[in-house]
Amino acid sequence: MAASAADVRSILSIPEPSATPGPSQPKRQIQPPTRKPEGISRELYALIGPSVPSLVVVKPRLKQKPNLGGGNKVKWESRPFKNSARQDSLELRHWVKASTAEDAEYPFAKYNVPTNVFTYSQDEYTRFLEDKDWSKDETDYLFSVAREYDVRWFVVYDRYDFPGGVTRTVDDLKDRYYSVCRKLVRNRPWAGDEQSKTAMISSYNFDKERELTRKKYILSLESRTPEQIAEEEALFIEVKRLEQNERKFKKDRDELLRTLAGIDSGLPDIVEDEGLSNLTIETKKKKRGSALEPDTPTTPVPATPVVKRPPTARNAAFDAANCIIRTDPPTTVPVTKAAHQPANLRSYKLPTPKSAVAPKITAALAELGINHNRLVMPTRDNIMQLESLLDATAALIETKRLVDKVEYDIRLLKGRLGMRESQGAESQPTGDHMDVDEPNDGEVIGEDGRAQSVVSTRSRKQARRSMSISSVDTSGTTTTRAGTKRQKRS
């Protein structure tokens, strides 16, 4: 048997080593046990040790189970009860909590809302409610059944069985009931305002004919066969396709006519073949001569569309019978604009004056008590009279403008003439100066006769002598020269 270390120390009398270390042995620092953080498994913490990463993965915790009061037990008891909404004192039983009071009211009695069913007297029935198709006994029976079943009409119709009466439909019952209610509300004294009374009457409205038509329509829809349903769906799809094609065709036609002929579509009187035949489009010629003729335009020049309205006797008679007046489009309209004049009412196309003179024309007609913006009877003759009136008023205003201008010019010229006369009177020449201007006895008057006109003017208007001095001098010199030339020729 092998000896252990303790046996050897006992034989050799060697003391056992003490738990405290000696001076030559370093003290061991006892580290406190670290606790594993949450979110890390025990195996992972044993591998990485206390160096826990900064981002700790936290396990999602499951939602805590709700406490349904399993710990506190509730005792239920079966107790008898009576519904206060019933009038027959029927007693039933139901399960309630033991903590509920014995005399507690039935909780569902508050949902029983009674319907307000009218009652009437014999006098009211005689005065307002009599009907040849309904007797008073049957009307009383109808109101009693309606009151019993809370005006639930299908239940009322199912329970309605008046002895000795005719067979009534649910629409007949509703029509009679609501008509009686409306008459009672309309003829009885009303404590509220008129608006609330009207609202109450409207709440009892019932249109029997409309209800029958609605039910008939629903019955016809419900009685369709599968073949009829499939046919209606096919027709609906076909109509939608035709509408889509029509919209597409109209858009293409508008774009084509606007591009080629400069007009809008929808004109049955325009012959498109003639309009398109007049277009000067020569693509091949332009391609060949593009290098030689660089100034050749590259856009087609459309011609004016031809509008044909044959004045046949049939059309004239039709227009006269239907009061239709056809007007030809103006020939001065540019090609880029639409030449079509759509049909319109005369009241929407009243003649209007030009914007420049519109205020003056309106003021002139207002003085006469005439309103040109509205016609009581916009017939063709009245519109022509209105147009002639506007033209005459515009001409009158233009004439007045010209007269005012002429009068202003006259006043201006008179003012200038007065200024000149005043200046001539201040600078009037003496008699010695005027003797120099007179011609000699041997002088011959020139062909223009300027000297004669000046002398006559001087004798007639003494105030204008100062203005004719230069003319007199010139005319005198001219006359002398003319006389000398004639003497030499002779």
Image (cartoon, grey):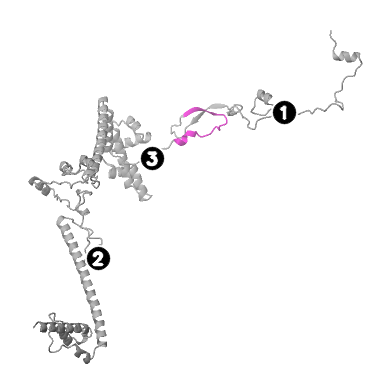
Query: Which amino acid lies under the numbered mark 1 shown in the image of this protein?
Result: Thr
Q: Nearer the viewer, residue 388 or 485?
A: 485
Count of numbered marks = 3
Q: CA distance from mark 3 to mark 2?
A: 72 Å
Q: Which residue is mark 3?
A: 116
Is residue 283 magenta-colored? no
Is the residue 262 above or below the residue 111 in the image? below
Provide the secondary structure element on which disc 1 rests.
loop
The location of residue 336, given as percent across then percent down, is 23, 49
Which residue type carries mark 2? Lys
The residue singled out by tag 1 in the image is 34
- Residue 101 position, x and y percent, is 56, 33
Which quadrant is home to the N terminus?
top right
Location of mark 2 (residue): 360
Q: Is residue 358 above or below residue 421?
A: above
User: Residue, x 20% and y 89% (percent of image)?
Assistant: 436
